[in-house]
Image: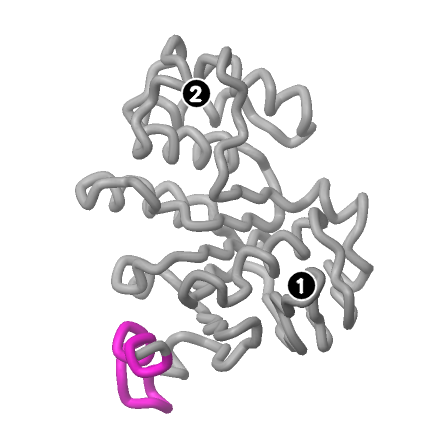
């Protein structure tokens, strides 16, 4: 679905991403791992078509990232992207206006499961509920690729299982999900593949189970080893 060939991104003097070679396959759930500043968000934004690479080639289904690929990619950023006047219901209408693949029925179902109410004001939500709102709006799209940047941020330990279940249900044979997070122990049970980024480069990537067998350790232990 996604192929990166020597992809790089430079901001003035800062090299945010360097020489990334990576393939993301259909129907898989990937964990994109690494500390702050490792290049995860920049890479996700390039795949989503929000930022252009300054080096290399980036393809979606064999074609360069562009207008057509944007229609198929649902990207959830770490930043809030709702206007202060909006209620939860307004957010749904806002997404429906922008995205042809947005399902209000699916959105309403997710809102109910996330313990939100349509009349709630977005600006008055706690950080955890605001995170759930962003996720519900993103997962209500019938996209082919979901890029979720730190979807568990601000969500308490009890609600994480609920959120992860909603993410897993979104995955299908023709849909790919990429999740960036520091909470590796939460992601390990649900992911098919892992990508470790460090200082803008991919240092380890592949099938999660194959990596566990080859390295003789869990993804959590490998994370500790790579970033200690």
Front one among 144 and 173: 144
Q: Which residues are magenta?
A: 212-226
**For residue 108, which numbered disc appears in the image?**
2
- First along the sequence among labels 2 and 1: 1
In which quarter of the view is residue 114 placed? Answer: top left
Which element is circle 2 on?
A: helix
Classify the position of the N terminus by image quarter. Answer: bottom right
Q: Residue at x 43, y 20 (%)?
A: 108
The label number, if any, that marks residue 16 in the structure image = none
Q: Does residue 227 sit above or below 109 in this rendering? A: below
In the rendered structure, the answer to whether residue 172 lies left or right of residue 3 reads left
Instruction: Give the vertical position of 43 relative to 93 (above or below).
Output: below
How many circles with numbers are drawn on the protein?
2
Q: Is residue 147 magenta?
A: no
The image's colouring method is: one colour
Residue under numbered circle 1: 2
**Relative side of 17 to 177, left or right:** right
What residue do we see at 63% from left, 52% from top? Answer: 45
Task: Tell me if residue 39 comes above or below residue 198 in the rendering.
Answer: above
**Main secondary structure type of the part rendered in magenta:** helix
Residue drawn 45% across the image and 13% down it: 87
Apparent side of residue 145 relative to residue 204 in the rendered image (left or right) = right
Q: Secondary structure at mark 1?
A: strand
Q: Report crowding for label 2: few under 14, some 14 to 19, many 20 or more residues within 10 A (C-alpha).
A: many
């Amino acid at each position: 679905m996604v192929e990166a060939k020597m992809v790089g991104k430079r901001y003035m003097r800062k090299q945010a991403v360097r020489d990334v070679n990576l393939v993301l396959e259909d129907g898989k759930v990937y964990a994109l791992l690494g500390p702050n500043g490792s290049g995860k968000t920049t890479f996700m934004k390039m795949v989503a078509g929000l930022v252009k690479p300054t080096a290399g080639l980036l393809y979606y289904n064999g074609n360069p990232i562009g207008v057509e690929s944007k229609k198929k990619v649902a990207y959830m950023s770490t930043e809030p992207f709702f206007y202060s006047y909006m209620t939860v219901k307004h957010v749904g209408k806002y997404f429906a206006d922008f995205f042809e693949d947005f399902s209000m029925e699916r959105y309403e179902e997710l809102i109910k499961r996330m313990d939100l109410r349509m009349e709630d004001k977005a600006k008055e939500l706690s950080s955890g509920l605001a995170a759930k709102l962003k996720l519900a709006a993103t997962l209500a799209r019938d996209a082919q690729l979901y890029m979720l940047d730190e979807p568990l941020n601000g969500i308490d330990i009890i609600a994480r299982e609920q959120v992860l279940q909603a993410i897993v249900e979104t995955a299908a044979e023709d849909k790919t999900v990429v999740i960036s997070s520091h909470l590796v122990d939460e992601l390990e049970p649900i992911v098919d593949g892992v990508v470790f980024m460090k200082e803008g480069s991919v240092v380890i990537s592949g099938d999660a189970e194959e990596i566990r067998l080859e390295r003789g350790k869990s993804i959590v232990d490998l994370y500790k080893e790579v970033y200690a």
